[in-house]
Image: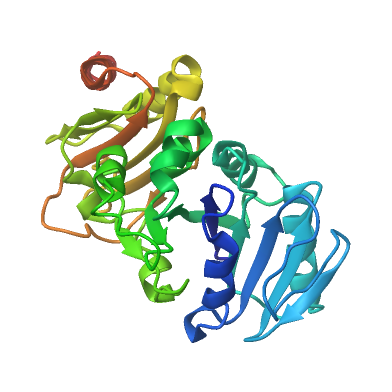
Amino acid sequence: MTPIPVSVITGFLGSGKTTLLSRLLRDPALERTAVIINEFGAVGLDHLLVESSDEQILMLEGGCVCCTVRGDLVRTAGELLSRRAAGAVTPFERIVVETTGLADPAPILHALMTDRDVAEALRLESVIATVDAAAGAATLDAHPQSVKQAALADRIVITKTDLADPAANGLAERLQALNPGAPKLTALHGAVDARRLFDGRARYDPAIYEAPAHHHAGINTFCLRRDKPLHAVTLSLFLQVLAEHCGARLLRLKGLVDVVESPGRPAVIHGVQHVFHPPAWLEAWPDDERSTRMVVISQGLDAGWMQDLLEVLDDEVKACSIS
C-alpha cells in the first residue's frame, strides 16, 4: 500500500492556523482529506466543525473527515486508518494535523515517523507554519517555541497581512534569516492556494539547497554537499552517528543523496532530532545537479564537523570494501 502523505500545520497561538485550515478544506485540491486537530478543549472550524470530543469523527464538506484529539495523536491516526480500511469513512488520500499553538512540533513528527502502528502507513510530507504579520515579531522574541515552529517548517504562511506589512515591520526579513529554504506565502484573509502548500515537493525541492549558511536566533542552517556518490553503508552510519550524538540539537535534516549502489535514483532522507525516516527513492533526479545535498537546521551544530564526519566514514567504508 502506498503510504498516505501527512502534513502538519503548526504556529503559535492566534497565528491563524484554524482560519487557514477552514479555508483550505473548502479548496477542491483538498478533497478526500482527513483532519486531526491536536488541541486542548473544543475547537471551532467556522461552520465546518462546531464542537467535537476525542471520541467523535465528523464528516465535513468536500468528502473530508475530522476529529479532535485531547489524548493520543497516534491512537487517533490509527483509528482513522482502521475506519478507512473498513470502509466506515471516506477513503481519504491525505492527512492534515493541526497542532496546538503551544506545541513543539518535534514530538508530533517523531510520533508520526516512528510508531509501529502508523509509521508504515503514513509518510510525513511537509510541515507548514503560520506566522501572524502583526504580532509575529514580538512572538518570536518572547516565545522560543514559535522560533522552533518557524525553523522546522517546509512552508511558512504569513497571516493577517491586512493588519500589518511584514516587510515594513521587519518580520519578513527575520523569517528569511531564520529559515531561508522555506517558501514564504501570504494568506489573503486566511486563504492560500492549497496546491502551493500540498504540492508533494517539500521533501525534495532543489530550491531548499540554494540558501547560504546562516545563524539567527540561536539556530543555524547550512548545506552539506558532496560531488562523489556515497556508499549506502556510509549513509546509514552517518545518520546513526547524528541520531546518537546530536539529539535535540539537530532540529531537522533533509537531503538528496547520490548512492553508489543506486545510480540515477537519489535517496530522499528526512530526520527530526534523533529520528529518521527510512530513505525514500526517487525515480530520477529532480534537477540537473546530480550530487548529494543535505540541509541541516540545528541549534549550534558545526558544519565543518559534519562534513568531515561524512568524508571520514566514506573513506573507512571504502577501505573496508577493498580489504
- From the image, which quarter does the N terminus lie in? bottom right
* Whether residue 323 is situated above or below residue 132 in the rendered picture: above
Q: Nearer the viewer, residue 161 or 183?
A: 161
Percent across and percent down for residue 163 are 40, 63
Q: Nearer the viewer, residue 88 or 16?
A: 16
Residue for point 52% across, 50% down:
11
Query: On the rendered structure, is 206 left or right of 255?
Result: left
Percent across and percent down for residue 71 are 81, 47
Residue for point 25% across, 13% down:
323
* Whether residue 91 is situated above or below residue 264 in the rendered picture: below
Query: On the rendered structure, is 3 left or right of 129?
Result: right
Q: Quadrant of residue 156?
A: bottom left
Q: Quadrant of residue 314?
A: top left
* Whether residue 217 is situated above or below residue 295 in the rendered picture: above
Percent across and percent down for residue 109 are 57, 43
Q: Nearer the viewer, residue 251 or 307?
A: 251
Q: Is residue 271 visible?
A: no
Q: Nearer the viewer, residue 98 or 139?
A: 139
Give the residue at the far front of this rendering. 163
Query: On the rendered structure, is 283 left or right of 31?
Result: left
Give the residue at the far right of this rendering. 55
* Whether residue 313 is situated above or below residue 187 in the rendered picture: above
Q: Is residue 190 visible?
A: yes
The count of marks equals 0
Percent across and percent down for residue 162 are 38, 68
Query: On the rendered structure, is 183 left or right of 69?
Result: left
Tell me the colour scheme of the image: rainbow
